[in-house]
Image (cartoon, rainbow, N blue to C red):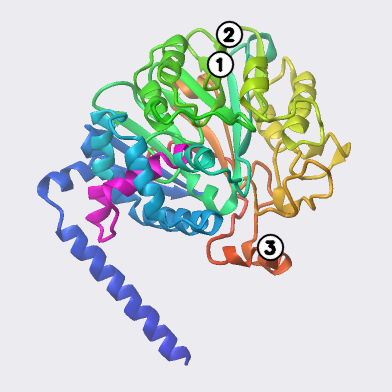
Amino acid sequence: MHKRFLSFLLLAFLLASFLSFAASQNLTEQEKEWLTKAYRHDKNGWIFLHIEGGPFERGFQRGYLTANEIDEFLKVVAYIQEFETAKELDFFVEAASRVFKNKVSEEYIEEMKGIVTGVEKTGKRVTFEEMLFMNGFIDILWHWWPQKKQSTELYRPGCSAFIATGEATADGKIVMAHNSWYSYALLRFCNIIVDIVPDKGHRILMQSWGPCIYSATDFFITGSGLIGTETTIGGFEGFDPEGIPVFERARKAMQYANSIDEWAKIMIENNNGAYANSWMLGDIRTNEIARLELGLKHHSLEKKKDGYFTGSNIVDNIKILREETNATYDDVRDFCVARRVRWKQLMKKFYGKIDVKAAKLMLADHYDVYLEKEMPSSRTICGHWELDDGRVPQSLGAYLPGGTVDGKVVDSNMAKNFELWAKWASSCDIGFDAKKFLEKHPQYEWLEGYLKDLPAEPWTIFPLKEKK
C-alpha cells in the first residue's frame, strides 16, 4: 500500500509538472516578456507580488503568478455563499454583471481581462464575469444581496486600526496600524501584498484579497505620499446599485489622488454605499492625518496634525450612526464598542511614545474591557471569535471560526522607502489549528476542507526586494 501511494504521488507530480510545462510553452513572446518584469516571493505566510506596466500587462502578470490562489478563492466563495444563501455562484456572477455595467473604467476592465488571460495560460479556467464578481464580491454579497433579500452574514466583518501623528508619536511623524477580521475560511486569501507600478498614476504597495485590483482589506502606501487604512462601519444598511462600486473608487483613489482631499473626493463622488468605512489617511509629506467617515447619505472629513484616529467598526458621525446603521454606540458588551473603549485606554497609555514597536504591541492586545481581564475574545483588539463561548449578551455566537488574521504597521520613514511591517495569522502568536478546532466544534463540519491552518508567523518587512 505504501509503495502504491508513493507511486500515485509521483504520477501526480509528473502530471502537474507536465501541465505546468505545457502551459509555459503556450505563452507568446509578448507574454514571456511581460513576465520578466514581474515576480513573486512567498515568505512567512505572505505572498509578495510585484507587477508593472499597462493595464492588461500587469493584470496578466498577476493572473499568471497567482492562478492557483485565484482558482481556490473562487471555489471557496462559491461554496460558502451557496451554503449561506442557497444561491449558486452563477446567480451572484450575473448580478455583478448587471450591477456593475457601465460603472467600471476601461483601464480596470483591461486589468481584469489581463488577470483572466494570465490564469487561463496556466491551465486554470475563469471568466471575465467571474473576475468582475470577485472584485466586487463585497458590493454584491455584503450589500446588494442583503438589500434584495433580508439575510444575515455568518460573521460581521471587522478590523482594528489607528493612525497617529505629531505630539502623539515618538518622532512627531505618522504611525499607522491595522488588523483584519472576518471568517478564517475566506480571509485566509488576503495574504497577498502587491507592489503595483502602473504605466500611469502612482505606484501602490497594498495588502489585497484574492484577485482584487484594489486592497479590499485596505492597508496601502502610494507614490503620492499618501498612506491609508480603514475599519468597516458596523451595522451599515445603505446601498445604491446605481452608484460606482467600491473597487473602482478605491483603486482610482490610490492610483491617481495627489492629496487627502483628492482621495476623499474620488471616494465620495457617485458613492454606492458599499463597504461603508471609517477611512484613516496620512500624508507623509506634511504629517497630516485625516478620517473620512463615509456612509451613503452622509460623510465627514476631519484632519489634524497632532493626535490620532482609531477604528473599531463604530462610526462617530452621528448622522451616519443614527440614520444609516443599526449599531449600538455605548454597550460595551458589543465587540465594536469594547474595542473602541480599549483603543482610548491604549492611546492614553502610549501617547507621545507611539512608534512601530508600540503599534505592534497594541495590535496584539488581548484585554477584554467588559470582563476586565486579559483574555482573547471577540471584544479584544486582536480578536478571536473562535475562543469566545458567546455567553456575553451582544455576542455574535459561540466559537465562530473567525477573527484577526494579520497585523500591519508602517511609519513615515518606512512609507518613504515603500516598506511596511506585516504579520500573518493574527496580530498575536496564537494562530489557528483547523483540525483541532473542527474536532472540538463539530457544528462547523460543513467547513471541513475549507478551513485551513493559520500558524502564527513572525513580523516581516515587505517588499522583499530580491528577484528570483
Q: Which residue is mark 1?
A: 298
Structural crowding at the residue carrying mark 1, measured as other residues with C-alpha within 10 Å and reported as few (<14), some (14–19) or many (≥20): some
Q: Which residue is mark 2?
A: 303
Q: Please, what secondary structure does the residue beneath circle 2 have?
A: strand
Q: Position of residue 21 (x, y in %)?
A: 21, 64
Of badges 1 and 3, nearer the viewer stands 1
Position of residue 390 relative to residue 316, above or below, is below
Structural crowding at the residue carrying mark 2, measured as other residues with C-alpha within 10 Å and reported as few (<14), some (14–19) or many (≥20): some
Q: Residue at x 54, y 10 (%)?
A: 287
Q: Which mark is residue 437?
A: 3
Q: Which mark is residue 32?
A: none
Position of residue 328 relative to residue 41, above or below, is above
Mark 3 to mark 2: distance in Å? 44 Å
Q: Nearer the viewer, residue 78 or 371?
A: 78
Q: Is residue 439 visible?
A: yes
Q: Position of residue 188 (x, y in %)?
A: 53, 50
Q: Nearer the viewer, residue 209 or 462?
A: 209
Highlighted magenta segment, given as a residue range: 116-139
> In terms of sequence position, does the residue under pointer 3 or pointer 2 come before the other?
2
> In terms of sequence position, does the residue under pointer 1 or pointer 3 come before the other?
1
Please name the predominant secondary structure of the magenta segment in the image: helix
- What is the residue that sits farthest to the left in this orientation? 29
Mark 1 to mark 3: distance in Å? 42 Å
Q: Is residue 166 left or right of residue 366?
A: left
Position of residue 375 relative to residue 310, above or below, is below
Q: Amino acid at mark 3?
A: Phe
Quadrant housing residue 265: top left
The answer to whether residue 82 is magenta is no
Q: Amino acid at mark 1?
A: His
